[in-house]
Image: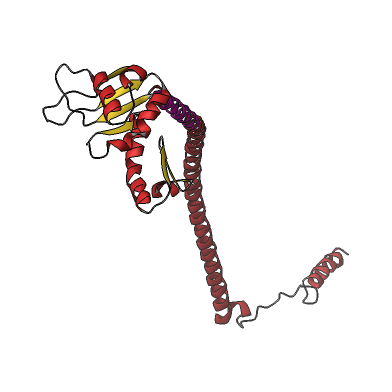
């Protein structure tokens, strides 16, 4: 019995170890795998190459970006510098603008002052002209009764009033002139010169009518060398002197001529020189 049991154990073991119960090991083929082919390796190398190119391109792109960032930093610094300069320029411009405004205001004030000064000058010139004309008029009025006698022989210790009375009686036909014609005063004009030409005598008549009587009879002195004229202030005398050529010209043409103070009247019209007509 023991044997049988033992035998049965062996039998079971044998059955266990039998080919039917032993797992079959997969046998490896000796054919090369696809992955081990040169083509596959080339593809893998190609992928690696592609990947390296991508990385290189990526690195290059990053480098460019970094360069651009560096440039941007430089640009930002420049922009900041420009902004600082612009601020400085703005400040200078504002300061200059303020100065210009001050100068403009000062100039406006100066222009206004100049305008007022000019107006004042014009006003003062008008006043001065008016005063001058008034003075000239007063001088002319003070000389209204005066006559000037020319070319009367001059002697030492002479009495000029007696000389005038003699001319009135002898040449102008005024009887008893020394009694009837009163002369307030008379004298030689200007300082005595070394030449032989006698100085004029100015005589102030007491009455205007007597002065006019002597003046209107002055034509009787023709041929004696003696002449008579009215006395006027220097300002009027200069104007009259400039008008005499026109007076003579108009007389030669037979026109009606009259000289009143500083005005020449020809045919009833006041004559005006060419420079005054412009």
In the image, 90 versus 122, the foreground residue is 122
Q: Is residue 135 magenta?
A: yes
Residue placed at 32% from the left, 33% from the top?
A: 229
In the image, 267 versus 162, the foreground residue is 162
Residue placed at 74% from the left, 75% from the top?
A: 24
| Side of 106 where 4 appears, left or right | right
> Eyeballing the image, is 162 above or below 33?
above
> Eyeballing the image, is 246 above or below 20?
above
Image x and y of residue 255, in percent: 41, 51
- Is residue 144 visible to the viewer in this orientation of the structure? no
- Is residue 18 visible to the viewer in this orientation of the structure? yes
Task: Report the predominant secondary structure element of the magenta stretch.
Answer: helix
Residue placed at 65% from the left, 78% from the top?
A: 28
Q: Quadrant of residue 217?
A: top left
Residue placed at 33% from the left, 43% from the top?
A: 244
Image x and y of residue 117, in percent: 47, 29
Image x and y of residue 100, in percent: 49, 36
| Side of 246 where 201 appears, left or right | left
Residue interval drawn in magenta: 119-139
């Amino acid at each position: 019995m023991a044997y049988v049991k033992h035998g049965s154990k062996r039998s079971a073991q044998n059955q266990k170890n039998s080919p039917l119960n032993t797992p079959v090991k997969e046998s490896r083929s000796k054919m090369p795998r696809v992955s081990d082919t040169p083509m596959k390796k080339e593809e893998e190398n190609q992928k690696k190459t592609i990947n390296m190119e991508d990385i290189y391109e990526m690195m290059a792109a990053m480098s460019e970006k970094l360069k651009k960032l560096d440039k941007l930093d430089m640009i930002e610094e420049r922009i900041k510098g420009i902004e600082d300069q612009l601020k400085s320029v703005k400040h200078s411009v504002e300061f200059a603008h303020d100065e210009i405004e001050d100068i403009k205001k000062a100039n406006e004030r100066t222009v206004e002052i100049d305008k007022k000064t000019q107006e004042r000058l014009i006003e003062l010139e008008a006043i001065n002209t008016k005063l001058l004309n008034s003075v000239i008029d007063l001088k002319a009025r003070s000389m209204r009764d005066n006559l000037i006698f020319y070319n009367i022989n001059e002697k030492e210790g002479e009495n000029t009033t007696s000389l005038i009375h003699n001319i009135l009686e002898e040449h102008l036909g005024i009887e008893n002139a020394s009694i009837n014609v009163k002369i307030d005063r008379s004298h030689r004009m200007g300082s005595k010169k070394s030449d032989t030409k006698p100085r004029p005598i100015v005589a102030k008549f007491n009455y205007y009518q007597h002065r006019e009587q002597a003046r209107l009879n002055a034509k009787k002195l023709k041929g004696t060398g003696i002449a008579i004229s009215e006395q006027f202030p220097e300002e009027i005398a200069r104007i009259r002197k400039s008008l005499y050529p026109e007076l003579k010209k108009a007389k030669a043409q037979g026109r009606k001529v009259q000289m009143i103070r500083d005005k020449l009247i020809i045919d009833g019209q006041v004559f005006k020189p060419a420079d005054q007509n412009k």
